[in-house]
Image: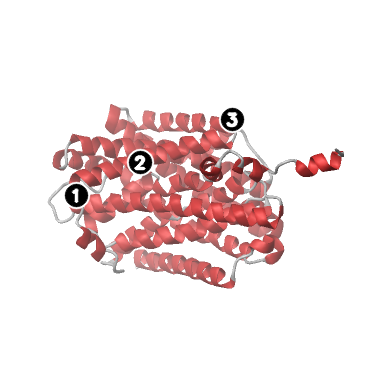
Amino acid sequence: MRDSDAVTAAPTQLQAVRGRGRLRGRALMMGPAFVAAIAYVDPGNFATNVSAGAEFGYRLAWVIVAANLMAMLIQSLSGKIGLATGRNLPELCREHFPRPVTRGLWVQAELVAMATDLAEVIGGAIALNLLFGLPLLTGGVLTAVVAFALLGLQGRGYRPFELAIAGLLAVIALGFVFSTAVTGLDGREVAAGFVPSFDGVDSVLLATGILGATVMPHVIYLHSALTQDRIVPVGARERQSLLKAQRLDVVLAMGLAGLVNLSMLVLAAKLFFGEDVAGVDTLEGAHAALDAIAGAPVAFAFAIALLASGFASSGVGTYAGQVVMSGFLQRQIPLLLRRAITMAPALVVLAIGFDPTQALVLSQVVLSFGIPFALVPLVLLTRRVDVMGELVNRPSTTAVAWAVAALIIALNGFLLIGILL
C-alpha cells in the first residue's frame, strides 16, 4: 500500500468519535453548550429571579422564556462561528475590526468580566455562609480556589472540564426540581405569567437584570472558543454534521438552564409573593424563609444549588476572561493574576459589608449593558460569507438576530431613562 493510500484511509476526528458507538459518539459531540449554560444559571440569576418572583409574582415569567429563546439563538451563532472559522469571536474581532474598536471592545469585556466575577464569588460566599457559617470574605476566597481547581482539569483535555461543569449544572437542576416537587406548581398562574407585561420601573429594572443574568456577554465570547478546535471538521459534510450536533447541544443545554431559571421565579412567586415575609429580597433571607415555610430540605437544596452555581460559574468566568484577553490583545497573563484582577471588586464588596444580594442584582444590570458589545460583532461577522463560508447565516437568521440586539438595546435605554428621571 502506498503512503498516500494510508493517509487517505486514516479516520478524521469526527469519524473517530463516531466510531465509539452511536450513543457515545453523539454524547462526545455534546458539551460546549453545557459549559456555556452554567453562566445562565449563575448566582446572579438566583438573586434576580428570586427578587422578581417575590415582588411581582409570576408577572415576569415571560421575560425568562424570551431571554432563554434569545440565548439559544445567540449561543448557536457563537458556537457556529468557532466551528466555521476555527477562531473565537475575540480573535475574529481583532482580525476584521479597526484597532480602536478592538481595544474598546476589550475594555468593556474586562469590565463585564469583573461584573461577572462579582456575582459568582459573592454567590459562592453566600452559599458557604448558609451551609457552614463561613464568613463571606473567607467564602469568596474559597470559591476562587475551587475555580482554579476546575480550570486545572483543562490540562487533561476538554472533556474532564466539560463533565465537571455539566455535573455541577445537574446539581443545580436537581435542587430546583426537588424544591418544585415539594412545594407544588400552579400551572394556570404560571401560564398567566407568560403574557408580556410590566408593573412600573422597578419591574423593568428586574426584567433587565433577568436579561443580563440570562444572556451573558462573556459566554458569547467563550462558546466560540469551546467549539473552535474541539473536533476539527474535514470538508463541508462534516461541518454540516457538527453544526447539527452543536445546535442540539445548545437546545438541550439552554433548555435545561431556562427551566432552572423559571423554577427559581416560580418557587419565589408561590411561597413569597403577597405574603408578609421579611427579607426575601436577599438570598440569605430567601433561604431563611424557605426553611420556615417549606422546610429544611428545600432550604438545603437551595443552598447546595447556589454553591454549585458559584463554584462552576466562577471557573467558567475565569476561562472566559482568558479567551477575551488572548483573543483581543494576543496576550496572556498568569492565571493567578488574571483571577486576582477580576475577583478584586467582589472581595472589596464582601470586605466593606455592602449588601451582597443588591450587589448581585446590580451586577446583572451591568452585564445587560455589555450584551450589545458582544452581540453586534457576532451578528456582523456571522452574516459575512467571506468569514463563515457555507455556514454563513441565512438572511432570516440575521434579521432575527438584529431584532434581538435592537430589543436588548431598547430595553436598556428605557431602563436608563427611567433611572435618571
Precedes in sequence: disc 3 or disc 2:
3
* Residue that carries the numbered disc 1 in the rendered image: 184
Q: Tag 1: Cα neighbours inside 10 Å, few (<14), some, or many (≥20)?
A: few
Q: What label does residue 156 carry, if any?
A: 3
Residue type at mark 2 is Ile
Query: What is the quadrant of residue 70 in the picture?
Result: bottom left
What secondary structure is found at the residue carrying circle 1? Answer: loop
User: Considering the numbered disc 2 on the image, is that residue within a helix, a strand or a loop?
Assistant: helix
Q: Is residue 232 left or right of residue 412?
A: right
Residue at the disc numbered 2 = 172
Give whichever of discs 3 and 1 has the lower sequence position. 3
The reply to whether dot 2 and dot 1 touch (C-beta < 8 Å) is no
Task: State the separation of the CA atoms marked 3 and 1.
Answer: 42 Å
The quarter of the displayed image where residue 351 is located: top left
Q: Provide residue 58's location: percent of width, then percent of height.
A: 24, 59
Q: Which element is circle 3 on? A: helix
